[in-house]
Amino acid sequence: MSACRQPRFAASIRFSAIDRGTHRMTPERNSIQTQGESRARYLGDLATHLQRIREQERALLARELHDELGAILTAAKLDVACLKSRLDPASPEIDRRLQHLAEMLGRGIALKSRVVEGLCPSSLANLGLASSLTILCRDFSLSSTIAVTTAIEEARGDDASELAIYRLVQECLTNIGKYACASTVSVTLVDAGKNILVEVLDNGIGFDIEQVASSRYGLAGMRHRVQACGGRLTVTSAQGQGTHVMAMLPKVVVESAKLIA
């Protein structure tokens, strides 16, 4: 009998030792988990702060381009017009060159306006989200020759939510123009009560979500932008099947989650 009981006694000692070791490890695991969660919150706050700083720098650069470069180009164009009016009209070569110079300055002014609007979309404050997205889609279609269809409702949110939606669509269109090899794109904006729904769908080559998610910061940036505003982002894609980006954001972003760009 004693020979049979010895293994059970030894086993109980081993299990007791394992239990004590497990109890000792539990506080360590909790500490590691707490540190991991704290680190994740810190990195999220840092990403939000960096996006806020980036938007502030965009606004500053846009003001400099508008006020300084815009004034220089406009003054040069006016000088060319003044010079042209005072020259002998019997000099067709000089007249042709001045006309070309005026046209180039006009193109420079138009380019400056597009860059300024891309950096800091004044149309959001002046025209609203729906009109701003319509203009954005129209300009993208003209510059890329990709057909863009829109179904955009009037939907107004606070500054943070509208800017996040505008940047999301802007980023989607940029990625489509660079990578998708698409021929058509559809952009949808829906007023969903307390939320705003935005969708961007293309018929391009698509991509593997699992591979791209870890290698492209653009997708991670879009997801963080939406989540920082208290919203949800869903990206669906597969090779040869296009890409569908859908986001639901609250119209009013709570102060603790407010994100600028």
Image (tube, rainbow, N blue to C red):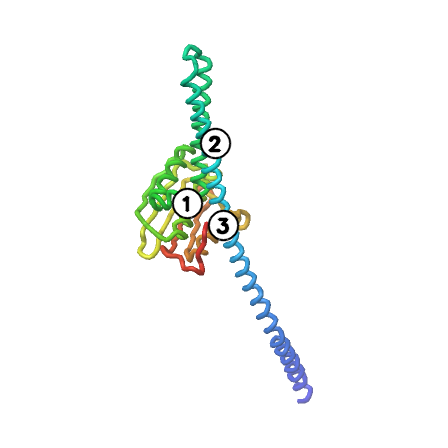
Of mark 2 and mark 1, the one earlier in the sequence is 2
Going by the numbered disc 2, the residue's amino acid type is Ile
Of mark 3 and mark 1, the one earlier in the sequence is 1
Name the residue that disc number 2 marks: 72
Name the residue that disc number 3 marks: 221
Q: Is residue 220 visible?
A: no
Looking at the picture, how far across and down is residue 204, in whole percent?
A: 43, 39
Q: Nearer the viewer, mark 2 or mark 1?
A: 2
> Do the residues bearing badges 3 and 2 touch, measured as CB atoms within 8 Å?
no
Q: Nearer the viewer, residue 200 or 114?
A: 114
Looking at the picture, how far across and down is residue 167, in whole percent?
A: 43, 46
Q: Is disc 3 placed on a helix, strand or loop?
A: helix
Please report the residue visible at 51 percent of the width from the left and 50 percent of the height from the top: 53
> Do the residues bearing badges 2 and 1 touch, measured as CB atoms within 8 Å?
no
Of mark 3 and mark 2, the one earlier in the sequence is 2
Q: Is disc 1 placed on a helix, strand or loop?
A: helix
Q: Nearer the viewer, residue 240 or 215?
A: 215
| Mark 3 Cα shell of 10 Å, populated few (<14), some (14-19), many (≥20) | some
Residue 50 is left or right of residue 183, and the answer is: right
Going by the numbered disc 1, the residue's amino acid type is Val
Looking at the picture, how far across and down is residue 62, in whole percent?
A: 47, 41
Q: Is disc 2 placed on a helix, strand or loop?
A: helix
Please report the residue visible at 34 percent of the width from the left and 47 percent of the height from the top: 189
> Do the residues bearing badges 3 and 1 touch, measured as CB atoms within 8 Å?
no
- Is the residue 260 above or below the residue 96 in the image? below
| Residue 145, numbered label | none
Going by the numbered disc 3, the residue's amino acid type is Gly
Looking at the picture, how far across and down is residue 154, in whole percent?
A: 30, 47
| Residue 169, numbered label | 1
Quadrant holding the N terminus: bottom right
- Tell me how far mark 2 sits from mark 1, CA to CA: 32 Å
- Is the residue 28 above or below the residue 165 in the image? below
